């Protein structure tokens, strides 16, 4: 029986000291613990990597303290338009949605696109129609409008040059059968233009998995991640050059650094159960659990994990 592992993230960003209150930090840490436990339990009980990553991301989408699902950022028009993707490393089947409204869990809609449609990606009204057809949970616009996101939106709209939120949530998993999977979901960039699509639903951009190498979920500046096809960059390095997973993630983050400047973070797990959590900013909300080892939750760069993420 192969080892099993789950890694999750709740977004990577450069944050000024004091910008994140102790209360908010504790809430986010607890949210990471909850999502990690929900996904890990599925793996521990012999369930699939696909079910584990979907379940973990659903928990983060339901938590208003992360930029996905209920906590999604608002567009320039003050609307919520969500993106998500899921991919099966065993078959290379994938599903993605973009610019979705009303759907409580966009990651489950992405799973429906993968499982119940002939397509890889659906957007806007077409995606919502599939959600209705499949009986997925729907919510009114007010469900997604939190006081936190409303204030952030007002700052972006009213103050030129204000820093936009660009967080994402994601999960990668290896199950006991040796299969890999990835799921990524986001509410996008606060104040983004109407119709903007980020890296999360782009297969190979912010989301990729293949059993012969690894599963990768990215977070940070979506345009930069897309331009570098960073999730697939990690996959290619591991598959083609046998680069160790942590090194592959570091190389992807540093890829054409002068041309691809911005916040970049990624989580990954390979076919042997090695994990990576790499980022170039000072904060990435992250958590992991490998087999029956103790779960690890961290946020700031200076937090040293109690165990080495990768065996060499």
Image (cartoon, rainbow, N blue to C red):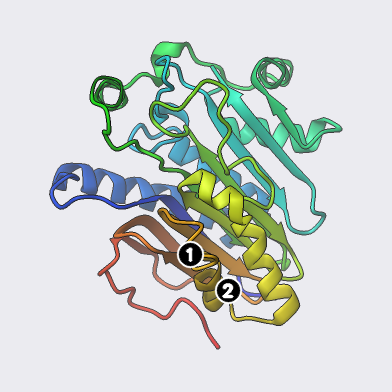
Position of 89 with respect to 192 (left or right) is: right
Position of 88 with respect to 160 (left or right) is: right
Dot 2 surroundings within 10 Å: few (below 14), some, or many (20 or more)?
A: many
Residue furthest to the right: 118
Q: Is residue 141 above or below residue 307?
A: above
State the residue in front, 284 or 204: 204
Residue 166, position as x, y percentages in the image: 41, 40
User: Could you give the CA–CA distance between mark 1 and mark 2, rounded to whole angstroms?
Assistant: 15 Å
Pointer 1 residue? 257
State the residue in front, 156 or 92: 156
Q: Quadrant of residue 167?
A: top left
Residue furthest to the front: 258
Quadrant of the image containing the N terminus: bottom right
Sequence order check: which comes first, mark 1 or mark 2? 2
Q: Which mark is residue 162?
A: none
Residue furthest to the bottom: 312
């Amino acid at each position: 029986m192969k080892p099993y592992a789950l890694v999750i993230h709740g977004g990577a960003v450069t944050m000024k000291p004091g910008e994140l209150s102790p209360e908010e930090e504790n809430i986010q840490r607890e949210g990471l613990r909850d999502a990690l436990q929900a996904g890990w339990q599925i793996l521990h009980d012999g369930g699939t990597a696909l079910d584990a990553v979907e379940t973990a991301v659903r928990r983060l989408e339901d938590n208003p303290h992360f930029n996905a699902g209920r906590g999604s950022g608002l567009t320039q028009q003050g609307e919520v338009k969500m993106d998500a993707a899921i991919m099966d490393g065993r078959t290379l089947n994938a599903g993605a949605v973009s610019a979705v409204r009303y759907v409580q869990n966009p990651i489950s809609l992405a799973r429906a696109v993968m499982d119940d449609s002939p397509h890889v990606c659906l957007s806007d009204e077409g995606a919502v129609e599939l959600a209705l057809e499949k009986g997925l949970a729907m919510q009114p616009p007010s469900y997604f409008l939190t006081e936190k996101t409303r204030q952030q939106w007002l700052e972006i709209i009213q103050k030129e040059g204000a820093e936009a939120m660009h967080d994402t949530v994601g999960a990668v998993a290896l199950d006991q059968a040796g299969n890999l999977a990835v799921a990524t979901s986001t509410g996008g960039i606060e104040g983004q233009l109407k119709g903007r699509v980020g890296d999360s639903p782009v297969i190979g951009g912010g989301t990729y998995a293949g059993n012969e190498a690894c599963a990768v979920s990215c977070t940070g500046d979506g345009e930069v991640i897309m331009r570098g096809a960073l999730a697939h960059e990690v996959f290619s390095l591991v598959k083609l050059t046998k680069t160790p997973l942590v090194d592959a993630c570091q190389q992807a983050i540093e890829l054409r650094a002068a041309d691809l400047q911005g916040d970049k973070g990624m989580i990954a797990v390979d076919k042997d159960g090695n994990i990576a959590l790499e980022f170039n900013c000072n904060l990435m909300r992250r958590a992991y659990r490998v087999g029956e080892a103790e779960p690890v939750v961290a946020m700031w760069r200076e937090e040293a994990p109690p165990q080495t993420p990768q065996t060499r």
